[in-house]
Image: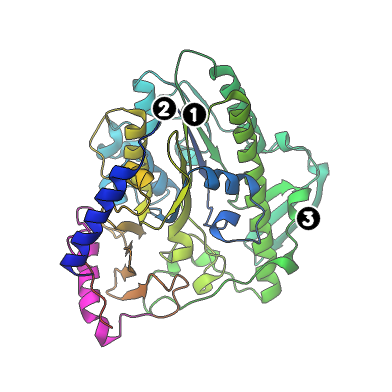
Amino acid sequence: MNRSIATFVLLMTFIATSAFAEPQTPVRNVIVIGVDDLRANLGAYGADWTQTPNLDRLASMGVQFNRAYTNVTICNPSRASFLSGLYPETTGVLTNRMPPRENPMLADAKFFPEAFEQAGYFTANIGKVEHKQYQDTMDVDEFSNPQDNFDESSVVHAGEIGKRFRWKAVDAPDDRFGDGMIADRIVELIKEKAGGDEPFFLQAGFHKPHADWIAPKRFFDAHPPDDMPLMPHGILSPPNTRGPLEGQRQIPVLDDDEERMVISMYAAGTSFMDEQVGKIMRAMDEEGLWDNTAVIFFSDHGFSLGEHDQWSKFNQWESTARIPFIIVAPGVKPAQSDTPVELVDMYPTMMELAGLEPPHELEGDSLVPVLKNPDALTDGIAYTVFGHTEGESRARVRSIRTPDYAYIQYYEGHDVLFSADDPDETVDLSQDPSYAEVLEQMRYLLENARTADYMDTPATQTP
């Protein structure tokens, strides 16, 4: 993309944005639905092997971001990042063992539920919002994190694959499972608060599809292994890098039948979570809240189901970095956006939708311009990291996605480059001399990812 094309794109973006209708009703309430380990395998994202009718409906009501990415592919660092609106290497939280509030950058920072609390909202965090060992550190009106509580005699089938993946099919009602209890409490709060004078902020943090995959039997029955696809494997990590070794215990060697079995269990957990989201949506229907309430759905990161021989989240591949991300808000027309966006953008977006000033400087970009015009770019870069280097405040594996490319760089000096038209990551372009200029530009953008603008430094593909 050359400068004249970039200028034309910006001009058309301005025209389209100007023509887009402003929200008819200001956002009064906010409901955030976060999920653990959910890759972009919903029906709305083309995964017809997973039954997700409720999330498919949600996607049809707002803006579905097709190229949304986590900023770090592990639970605690991801949550510290998106809750604070700061990049992982700014927070300094790069492992699950780092307590977020002990880092000087986060000691006094307001996580976004606290920003709504400070603004006078009723606030509740129900479920897994912060990582499990650091939960209940936020100043909100209500917090609980229900866990499964069924009688083991109701387990009708259980198993383990590859000494890593365990599941239980249980003959018990939804309200005996943690996610069922989370949904029930959110529904109760919606009904309690809908007609009141006080605006509310509710966050549901669902556990599934994080392993172990424990859910009502009907969801396993609906996803038989023989109906599951095998994922495209793509290329392997460069030799002599620690990329795959970080999660070695989560990389079993499985045959095709075992792969399908794991994928079916993951799909069952996903579908169970979808049903809980449906309960929240039906409560909003009954209370007539869609005209004044924003709903944001996302996952903390994805999960590889055999891609690149990975069965984990400890990597930078597309299957793990990419997440489902949906925003429904008053006056926002249903659409899909292919603009690269990242989880750190969620905090500033909520602040702008609610008409609030952020309590501290945020590093993400508000996505309100993209909600108005799905073809608009923010900075055009999604930045993702994993792992840490001893004595340094940089991650071991880092990557960026732009409108045209995906680029991964390993601490050991290796890098890989893919076209955005190759989401299965099958052809590494980094060794192709005709892409030498693109590779240098991507290296520059990676080093400056938190401040660079893709439109100012366009990566020009050489035919």
Against 50, residue 346 (above or below) is: above
Please tell me which residue lies in front, 170 or 399. 399
Q: List the residue tagged with mark 3.
A: 221
Q: Earlier in the sequence, mark 2 or mark 1?
A: 2
CB atoms of marks 2 and 1 within 8 Å: yes
CB atoms of marks 3 and 2 within 8 Å: no
Please tell me which residue lies in front, 145 or 33. 33
Q: From the viewer's perspective, is the residue at label 3 or at label 1 nearer? A: 1
Quadrant of residue 453 in the image? bottom left
Position of residue 130 measured from the top left corner of the image (x, y, whole percent): 45, 38
Q: Residues within 10 Å of mark 2 (few under 14, many from 20)?
A: few
Position of residue 310 measured from the top left corner of the image (x, y, whole percent): 52, 69
For residue 126, side relative to residue 3 (left or right):
right
Give the number of the disc on residue 291: 1
For residue 2, side relative to residue 48 (left or right):
left
Amino acid carrying label 1: it is Asp
Amino acid carrying label 2: it is Thr
Q: From the viewer's perspective, is the residue at label 3 or at label 2 nearer? A: 2
Against 367, residue 329 (above or below) is: above
Quadrant of residue 423 in the image? bottom left
Q: Dot 3: what SS?
A: helix
Quadrant where the image shows the C terminus:
bottom left
Q: List the residue tagged with mark 2.
A: 25
431 within the magenta span:
yes
First to last magenta residue range: 428-457
Position of residue 141 measured from the top left corner of the image (x, y, whole percent): 46, 20
Measured Cα–Cα span from mark 3 to mark 1: 37 Å
Image point (69%, 48%), residue name = 214
Image point (72%, 38%), residue name = 174
Quadrant where the image shows the N terminus:
bottom left
